[in-house]
Amino acid sequence: MPRPATLPIIDWNAVFTSGLDYAAWLASAESAEQRNKLEDQRQALTLEPGVAGFLGALPRLVHVVAIAEDWCGDVVRHVPVLQRMAEAAPLLKVRYLTREQWPEVFARFLTNGGEAIPKFIFLSDRFVECGNWGPMPEACRTLIARGKACGDVATARKKVAARYEADGNRREVVEELLQRIDVASSREP
């Protein structure tokens, strides 16, 4: 029986270190309009007190590699959530990079075989990969997959847009990101 291909080991510390912090990433945005949308979204987002308390009390450092580019609507919607969470968590460090910077890394995080961003990769304090998220909440990914399966992606996208509209404070995204942060910061199984 043939053995499956072995993927090369990723030096997550090098990947993380090569990324930009939020301010530098935002300054490098291709579009001033998108940069303004990102900042408006970030400033408008308020974390619930329980979420802010959890983030402020993380027991260990968590690193997040965020593969994101400002032209993408899902990036504009979801990066501000991650960034606002990082601002509430002294032990949550995020670095932003593009697909082109590390194509071999991005290739591991395709969505149903396609290039979709953002992708957030959660790493422990020792740069051990602990999970990933993106490009949208699980329920939305399921809607898009169903749309592809039945040949009606347009209707699926309308349903995703309706979910986004109904969740103005991004609670669904916050909850899913919190789960991954919790795992990456765990002190025990």
Image (cartoon, rainbow, N blue to C red):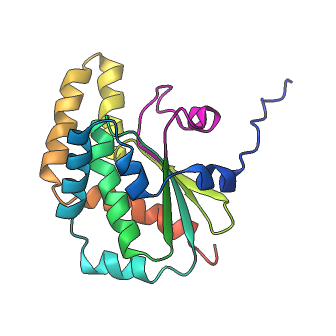
Where residue 87 sits, quadrant-wise, is bottom left
In the image, residue 128 lies at what x, y percent?
67, 59
Query: Relative to 9, does residue 42 appear above or below in the rendering?
Result: below
Residue lying at 54% horizontally and 81% vertically, measured from the top left: 59
Q: Quadrant of the N terminus?
A: top right
Where is residue 147 shown, x and y percent of the image?
A: 29, 25
Quadrant in which the C terminus is drawn: bottom right
* Quarter holding residue 116: top left
In this rendering, the count of numbered labels is 0
The residue at the point 47 percent across, 33 percent down is 111
| Residue 148 placement, left or right of 33 | right
Q: Is residue 113 left or right of residue 86?
A: right
Task: Give the main secondary structure of the magenta stretch.
Answer: loop
Task: Tell whether position 108 is magenta.
Answer: yes
Q: Which residues are magenta?
A: 97-119
Q: Does residue 57 appear to the left or right of 61 in the view shown?
A: left
**x, y (%) of residue 138?**
37, 46
Task: Return the residue nearer the eye: 169 or 63.
Answer: 63
Residue at left offset 24%, top offset 19%: 152
Q: Is residue 165 above or below residue 5?
A: below
Residue 98 included in the magenta stretch of the image: yes
Residue 108 position in % (x across, y down):
60, 36
